[in-house]
Amino acid sequence: MTPAVTWRHGITGILLDPPYDSGEHAIRYAGGTGSISREVREWAIANGDNPLLRIALCGYEGEHDMPESWECVRWKAQGGYGSQGKGRGRANAARERIWFSPHCLRVGLPLLEASA
């Protein structure tokens, strides 16, 4: 992402929800390295101190090693096909996390807090 489509026009919120990087969910794209989640995390960290960016990065617990200045919020997915059965999708629902960059404003997250 370039400055022209992010912070150059003012404060910008960015939600990053890359494919899971763990072995059980790794996705390889044509011509890709198979490490999209790691590359997205690196971009987020490199840009997280920009006061004009509000970055939220989604993933599983333990998937992203983020700086201490980022806030990690746990939540539990309520729907989706994975939570309908008795397999790992149900267990994985409780592993969901969102990391917020230092310049995100904390105004209350009632939807996330109610489901955690």
Image (cartoon, rainbow, N blue to C red):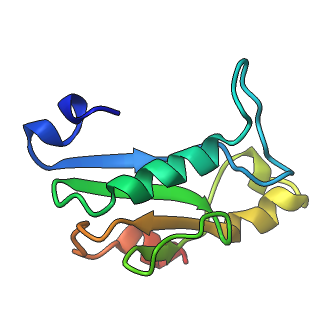
Q: Percent position (x, y) of residue 80? A: 68, 47
- Is residue 69 in sight in this rendering? yes
- Between 111 and 71, the one lying in front of the other is 71
Question: Residue 40, image x and y in percent?
Answer: 52, 46
On screen, residue 84 versus residue 16, left or right, reads right
Q: Position of residue 9 (x, y in %)?
A: 9, 37
Q: Quarter of the image containing the N terminus? A: top left
Q: State the residue at coordinates (16%, 54%).
A: 52
Furthest-top residue in this view: 30
Residue at the extreme bottom of the image, as rendered: 68
Q: Quadrant of residue 34?
A: top right
Horizontal and vertical percent position of residue 77: 61, 61
To which quarter of the image does residue 46 belong? bottom left
> Residue at 12% of width from left, 38% of height from top?
8
Residue 17 appears in the figure: no
Left or right: residue 11 compared with residue 3: left
Up-down: is 72 above or below 56? below
In the rendered image, the residue lying farthest to the front is 46
The mark total stands at 0
In this view, which residue lies farthest toward the left?
A: 10
- Classify the position of the C terminus by image quarter: bottom right
What residue is rendered at 34% in x and 56% in y? 55
Going by the image, does 20 lie left or right of 11?
right
The residue at the point 66 percent across, 71 percent down is: 61
